[in-house]
Amino acid sequence: MKHLVFLTGAGMSAESGISTFRDSNGLWEQYDVMEVASIEGWYRNPDLIQKFYNERRAQLNEVEPNEGHKMIASLEKSFKVTVVTQNVDDLHERAGSTQVIHLHGELTKACNESKTKVYEIGTKAIHPEDKAEDGSRLRPFIVWFGEAVPLIEKAAEVVSEADVVVIIGTSMQVYPAAGLIHYAKKDAPVYLIDPNPVDDSSFRVEIIKKKAGEGMAILLEKLI
């Protein structure tokens, strides 16, 4: 059974209505990314960060997996499929994908300050008085700028084993995730689904210039 590995980013969930930082009218315009997505921001203003991620978590109740998510999940009937995502939402899982690696953490989880104890919280808010078992402040289970990406080695291993690599909704400009494509086998086809202009000079790639849902429909014809 062929092994398909999907590398997904914000554009994957955009069709479900989840705002991205980089798009016009996106989260960049409402927040300074270093205030809400860095470990320094957490130390500086944890209440702001809790508010930001409580809002992101609550939004999960208002969105659903899109056709792109569902088509990726449907491929598990014919292939071994692993999703490596930069997204912190749970839309891949809700669509039915069973092997998902979240590089940047998960909105539906919280952890203690040292990130050694993880708690499932679903879409509940984290309050300032909420504490972990060790007495430290409960924080979002998110990998922020300034923190290590603990699953990057596992993701690199998965990409190195892939028979086909598909990139959806990410410019692959943010490291260390951007370096994953270079672990792909030399004979593994690489597809990139993105409606925006992409600089593909750094690696071999077949571009499908469509949004996630439309692009996945085209990809399915190629794969099956």
Image (tube, rainbow, N blue to C red):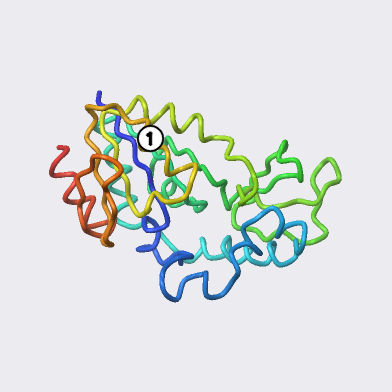
The answer to which image quadrant residue 129 occupies is bottom right
Is 185 positioned to the left or the right of 43 in the image? left
Residue, far right: 135
Residue for point 47% across, 51% down: 87
Residue for point 75% across, 44% down: 112
Residue for point 23% across, 39% down: 204
Hey, what amino acid is under mark 1?
Answer: Thr
Residue for point 62% across, 40% down: 148
Q: On the image, numbered disc 1 is attached to which residue? A: 82
Is 116 positioned to the left or the right of 56 in the image? right
- Residue 182 x, y percent position in the rendering: 36, 34
* 166 to 107, vertically: above or below: above
How many marks the image carries: the answer is 1
**Foreground pick, 76 / 22:** 22
**Foreground pick, 109 / 211:** 211
- Residue 104 x, y percent position in the rendering: 54, 46
Is 120 positioned to the left or the right of 188 in the image? right
Quadrant of the image containing the N terminus = top left
The answer to which image quadrant residue 81 occupies is top left
**Foreground pick, 182 / 72:** 182
